[in-house]
Amino acid sequence: MLALVFGVLSVIMIVISIWGFKMHQAFSYDGKRQMSRQIIEGVASYITIPAGGKGLDVGCGSGALAIAAAKKNPGAMVIGIDRWGKEYASFSKTLCENNAQAESVTNTSFFPGDAVNLNFEDESFDAVFSNYVYHNIPSSNRQEILLETLRTLKKGGVFAIHDIFSQDKYGDINAFLATLKSMGYENVELIDTTKGMFMTPKEAKWMMLSGSALLVGRK
């Protein structure tokens, strides 16, 4: 019986190892599939910041999206904030700065910050954006966290937020889109990124990213 248990555990560990390897292959920024690069550059393509303006990357992690946005908008300053907690010990402010330096990007700054309570005045930024952040924040109302981010966006500014917008994580997202429109936000759209834009439905399923979508619009 004990041998059977160990056998089952061994099979499970092998399956997990294979899954982890395939995940790394798919998400590796410089790997064969380069899904991370595709997502980062895809989100960045929606970010437009005027010369002399400022953009905010909420939950910047390693700084990848902030750096991509800074490259696309060389006349603007891009600020990245993150908690860089023990849950993501491999990410840090220093890593972000080193990555920006490695890419010869000089128009970024990185600071500790909390997406739930941003330390910025209303209408401070010309663009706000993030990638796979809010669904990881423990909350009974992630729509409120989105509104906290949008609070810092200037009138006329754009937003591009990529996340897993499933019912269990965000509630009725269509009602939220309607709320944004009623508040005066324009060109509000939720774009499914699992149908070939960033990944296939099959990839989204085995990587547990079903429900991924890009929320875009203008204030």
Image (cartoon, grey):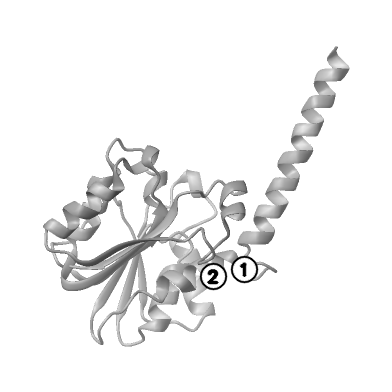
**Amino acid type shown at disc 2:** Gln
Residue 97 visible: no
Residue 27, horizontal then vertical, whole percent: 61, 60
Q: Is residue 90 above or below residue 87?
A: below
- In the rendered image, the residue lying farthest to the right is 3
Q: Quadrant of the C terminus?
A: bottom left
Q: Residues within 10 Å of mark 2 (few under 14, many from 20)?
A: some
Residue with the mark numbered 2: 38
Residue at the image point whose x is 26% and y is 52% from the top: 146
Q: Is residue 79 above or below residue 151?
A: below
**Amino acid type shown at disc 1:** Gln
Residue 140, horizontal then vertical, whole percent: 29, 35
Q: Secondary structure at mark 2?
A: helix
Q: Secondary structure at mark 1?
A: loop
User: Which residue is more in the foreground, 17 or 212?
Assistant: 212
- Tag on residue 34? 1
Would residue 144 be found to the left or right of residue 29 on screen?
left
